[in-house]
Structures are given as structure tokens and as C-alpha cells.
Image: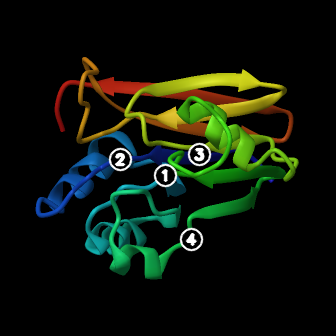
């Protein structure tokens, strides 16, 4: 298989303004084949909208209610283009002082190549013990960060590329 592009988002925290997801896809994720959301949707309509636009995978976060939790899991492992990808929100009750430690420890026994997580609203791309750790930050709730953010992940047979996209508004 050739290259596949994946849009990675997390912590959208959208209760009412569902249209923001459409804007996000149109402006920053229009050419991705799939969107992975690492939790804290707040509204199940966000999941439905993403699914209507792109192939979707996602997990629930600590701010997601029963409706969202019934639609998706807390932890997910996908195989995409020969890579094994673990997805969690990062709030999990596993050992670790930081969000990245908790995400790493949750998949420690799963032999994944990439771990996608959220929770901190801080974009990160780094490796930990040969595993690519990706946190897209937030496209709609930047908190103390200067910019909103998403990550575009490109997977090829012998090459992985991850790029943070920073923006001031949708």
C-alpha cells in the first residue's frame, strides 16, 4: 500500500458549536483519508459528523458522558498501513506521573509503533523507547497554548511523517 494521511485531533470539548468540526476538516484536514480523535468530544454529534466526512477511529476521554462512552472504547489499537497504533485519552488510572507516561504505560505490553493520546491540550511529537508518541493538542480549546493545533500523520512502508499544524482560529 502507498502513503496514507491521517488527521489527528483531541480535546475538542464541543457541546454546541458542532459546525467547528466541519470548519476544521475543510481548512486543515481536507486531504486526509481518516481522522483519529483521542477523546473529550463532549457531544456524540461530533463523532457522527466526523464519520459522515471521513473514516473515523476514536476513544472517549474523561469529559465524555455516557452517550459518547457507549459509542466508542476507552482504549483502541488499530493496524494501519503495516503500523500498530494505540489510541487513548491519557487520563487513565495507570502508573505514571505525566500524561505521556500514562499513555505509554497503558500500551507497554501491546507492542505498538505509535501511541496517540490527548488530555493535556499540549501538542507533542516525540519518541519514547522506540515508540512514536503523538498528542495533537486541541483544535478548539487551546487553554494556555498560544495556538490551536492538529497533527497530520503520514504512514508509508518505510517512513513515518508527523507534522503539527498550528493556527490562531478556525
Q: Nearer the viewer, mark 1 or mark 3?
A: 1
Q: State the image coordinates of residue 55 (x, y, percent, origin top left).
A: 52, 67
Secondary structure under the numbered disc 1 in the rendered image: loop
Residue for badge 1: 38
Q: Which label belongs to residue 64?
A: none
Q: CA distance from mark 4 to mark 3?
A: 23 Å
Q: Is residue 109 above or below residue 47?
A: above
Q: Are marks 4 and 2 in contact (CB under 8 Å)?
A: no
Secondary structure, mark 4, is loop
Residue 81 to residue 117: above or below: below
The residue where tag 2 is placed is 11
For mark 3, what is the residue? Answer: 5
Neighbour tally class for label 4: few under 14, some 14-19, many 20 plus, Cα within 10 Å: some
| Real-space Cα separation, disc 1 to disc 3, in angstroms | 17 Å
Q: Name which residue lies at 73% across and 42% down.
A: 105
Question: Label 2: few (<14), some or many (≥20) within 10 Å?
Answer: many
Give me the disc on residue 73: 4
The alpha-carbon separation of the residues under discs 1 and 2 comes to: 7 Å
**Is residue 54 shown left or right of residue 141?**
right
User: Mark 1 touching mark 2, by CB under 8 A?
Assistant: yes
Question: Where residue 110 sits: x, y (%)?
Answer: 85, 53
Mark 3 Cα-neighbour bin, 10 Å: few <14, some 14–19, many ≥20: some
- Secondary element under disc 2, as helix, strand or loop, is loop
Which comes before the other along the chain, label 4 or label 3?
3
Residue closest to the eye, 98 or 122? 98
Query: In this image, 153 relative to 91: left or right?
Result: right
Q: Earlier in the sequence, mark 1 or mark 3?
A: 3
* Secondary structure category for the residue under label 3: strand
Amino acid at each position: 500500500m502507498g502513503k496514507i494521511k491521517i488527521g489527528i485531533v483531541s480535546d475538542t470539548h464541543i457541546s454546541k458549536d458542532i459546525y467547528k468540526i466541519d470548519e476544521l476538516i475543510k481548512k486543515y484536514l481536507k486531504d486526509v483519508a481518516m481522522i483519529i480523535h483521542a477523546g473529550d468530544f463532549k457531544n456524540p454529534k461530533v463523532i457522527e459528523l466526523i464519520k459522515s466526512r471521513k473514516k473515523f477511529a476514536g476513544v472517549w476521554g474523561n469529559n465524555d458522558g455516557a452517550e459518547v462512552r457507549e459509542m466508542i472504547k476507552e482504549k483502541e489499537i488499530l493496524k494501519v498501513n503495516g503500523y500498530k497504533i494505540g489510541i487513548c485519552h491519557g487520563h487513565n488510572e495507570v502508573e505514571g506521573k505525566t500524561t505521556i507516561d500514562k499513555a505509554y504505560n497503558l500500551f507497554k505490553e501491546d507492542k505498538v509503533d505509535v501511541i496517540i493520546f490527548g488530555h493535556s491540550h499540549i501538542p507533542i511529537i516525540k519518541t519514547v523507547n522506540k515508540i512514536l508518541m503523538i498528542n495533537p493538542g486541541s483544535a478548539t480549546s487551546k487553554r494556555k497554548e498560544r495556538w490551536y493545533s492538529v497533527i497530520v500523520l503520514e504512514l508509508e512502508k518505510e517512513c513515518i511523517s508527523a507534522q503539527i499544524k498550528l493556527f490562531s482560529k478556525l
